[in-house]
Amino acid sequence: MAEILVAYATKSGSTREIAEVIAEQIRHAAHEVTVLDAADVRSVEPYKAVVLGSALYAGRWRREAVKLLMRNEKLLARRPVWLFHSGPIGPQQVPQRAPRKVREIAARIGADEPATFGGRLTSEAAVGFIARKMAGSSLAGDFRNWDDIRLWAHLISERLVAAR
């Protein structure tokens, strides 16, 4: 059984790719890591620490990520938790606040405000009328900064090593 859970909620796969890179970085510090879709996580009981990320659309987290937080709130309060979201697109990256409900749960479980990572919007992955329109504009592209993501994950792995 892995000691660290990295869970994600995604619409087009971009947040899953971020979660996989985070897990890879944490594994470099000799931690066992499981990566799961948030919808597939029933309980965080088996894990010593949790990293949870969600795609951010119109200021909202994916429902399955919020449900994971709500369903496991008491267990999450007893272990280290890191949160992130991805979704800002376009050339001007501005960190975005998590939705109020996510911020409230984060405060109750002792987690920091989620880290914000750029998102990806391509015509191939665009789902829905609005996303397809945006994919044809200057907002289209891959705005994920892999160096920032790896650095954030490295900081997590350092904190986990220090807590051993």
Image: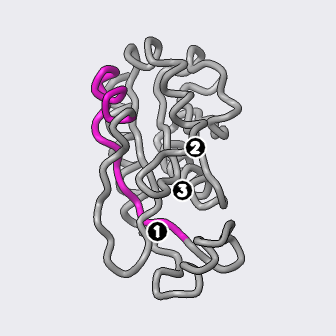
Question: Residue visible at 62% across and 77% down?
Answer: 122
Q: Are marks 1 and 3 in contact (CB under 8 Å)?
A: yes
Residue 82 point in image, percent of width and height: 39, 36
Mark 2 neighbour class, 10 Å CA radius: few under 14, some 14 to 19, many 20 or more: many
Residue 80 point in image, percent of width and height: 38, 25
Mark 3 neighbour class, 10 Å CA radius: few under 14, some 14 to 19, many 20 or more: many
Residue 144 is marked as 1
Q: Which span of residues is magenta-colored?
A: 102-120
Q: Which residue is mark 3?
A: 18
Tell which circle, 2 or 1, labels the residue nearer the N-terminal end. Answer: 2
Q: Nearer the viewer, residue 160 or 104?
A: 104
Question: Residue visible at 39% across and 14% down?
Answer: 78
- Please determine whether, in this image, residue 132 is positioned above or below residue 17: below
Q: Amino acid at mark 2?
A: Tyr
Mark 2 residue element: strand
Mark 3 residue element: helix
The number of callouts visible is 3
Q: Amino acid at mark 1?
A: Arg
Residue 21 point in image, percent of width and height: 54, 55
Residue 75 point in image, percent of width and height: 47, 13
Say which quarter of the image contains residue 83: top left
Q: Are marks 3 and 2 in contact (CB under 8 Å)?
A: yes
Q: Which residue is mark 2?
A: 8
Q: Amino acid at mark 3?
A: Ile
Q: CA distance from mark 3 to mark 2?
A: 9 Å
